[in-house]
């Protein structure tokens, strides 16, 4: 009876581990989708509202979820206080500090850092082109993740179940 209970617990733990890994894959895609939404909002603020970047960050940051809320609000505060001279420095440190624990892949974070060097110093059209270029790259990354997401989720769940069964067999 104890072996049966232990086996059920081990298999259950394997299933939970697989579900947890599958959830991380989903969260990565959701964070990228939220980043995409924020950058479209930033594009709209720059293009249509003609807002300066500090105001745009503040407005977008109020509606954003974490970790993006803290990132946008901090950039707005730094720009308001003129803490750093250039937006590229504020942007880069903000991405590194606020988004270091996000589930977004490193290559996409590096691209996001690069985007900051193209904002603020250029004219309106150049900023919009830079945002459009980054949004296109982000869209391609999201498509890659979405294509592999179903397979990865299924694989994580199956490995969790099979791993639990394997450990149970080894222990019996």
Image: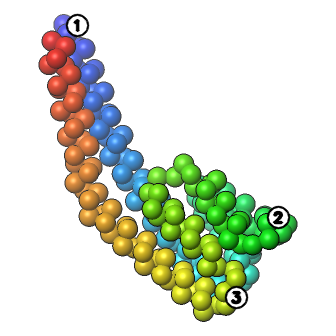
**Quarter of the figure with the C terminus:** top left
Compared with residue 162, is residue 99 higher up or lower down, i.e. above or below? below
- Residue 79: % across, % down: 78, 69
166 sits to left or right of 147 = left
Secondary-structure class at tag 3: loop
Q: Which residue is mark 2?
A: 83
Distance from disc 3 to disc 2, alpha carbons, whole Å, reads 23 Å
Distance from disc 1 to disc 2, alpha carbons, whole Å, reads 63 Å
104 sits to left or right of 143 = right
Give the residue at x 37% y 67%: 142
Secondary-structure class at tag 1: helix
Q: How many marks?
A: 3
Distance from disc 3 to disc 1, alpha carbons, whole Å, reads 69 Å
Compared with residue 46, is residue 38 higher up or lower down, i.e. above or below? above
Compared with residue 146, is residue 120 higher up or lower down, i.e. above or below? below
Give the residue at x 27% y 49%: 153
Mark with earlier residue (3, 1): 1
97 sits to left or right of 20 = right
Can residue 3 be seen in this snapshot? yes
Give the residue at x 32% y 33%: 16
Secondary-structure class at tag 2: loop
On residue 31, which mark appears?
none
**Quarter of the figure with the N terminus:** top left
Q: Name the quadrant containing residue 77.
A: bottom right
On residue 50, which mark appears?
3
The reply to whether the C-beta atoms of the residues labelled 3 and 2 are less than 8 Å apart is no
- Residue 140: % across, % down: 36, 73
- Between marks 3 and 1 in the image, the one whose residue lies nearer the viewer: 3
Compared with residue 145, is residue 138 higher up or lower down, i.e. above or below? below
Q: Which residue is mark 1?
A: 2
- Residue 165: % across, % down: 17, 26
């Amino acid at each position: 009876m104890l072996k049966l209970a232990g086996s059920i617990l081990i298999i259950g733990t394997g299933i939970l581990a697989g579900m947890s890994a599958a959830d991380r894959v989903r969260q990565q895609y959701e964070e990228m989708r939220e980043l995409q939404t924020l950058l479209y909002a930033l594009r709209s603020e720059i293009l249509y509202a003609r807002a300066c970047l500090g105001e745009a960050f503040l407005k977008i940051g109020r509606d954003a979820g974490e970790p993006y809320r803290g990132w946008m609000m901090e950039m707005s505060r730094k720009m308001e206080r003129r803490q750093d001279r250039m937006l590229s420095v504020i942007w880069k440190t903000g991405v590194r500090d606020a988004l270091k624990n996000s589930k977004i892949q490193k290559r996409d974070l590096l691209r996001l850092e690069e985007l900051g060097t193209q904002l603020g110093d250029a004219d309106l059209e150049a900023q919009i082109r830079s945002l459009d270029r980054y949004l296109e790259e982000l869209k391609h990354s999201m498509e890659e993740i979405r294509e592999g997401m179903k397979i990865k989720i299924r694989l994580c769940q199956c490995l969790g179940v099979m791993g639990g069964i394997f450990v149970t067999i080894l222990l019996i």
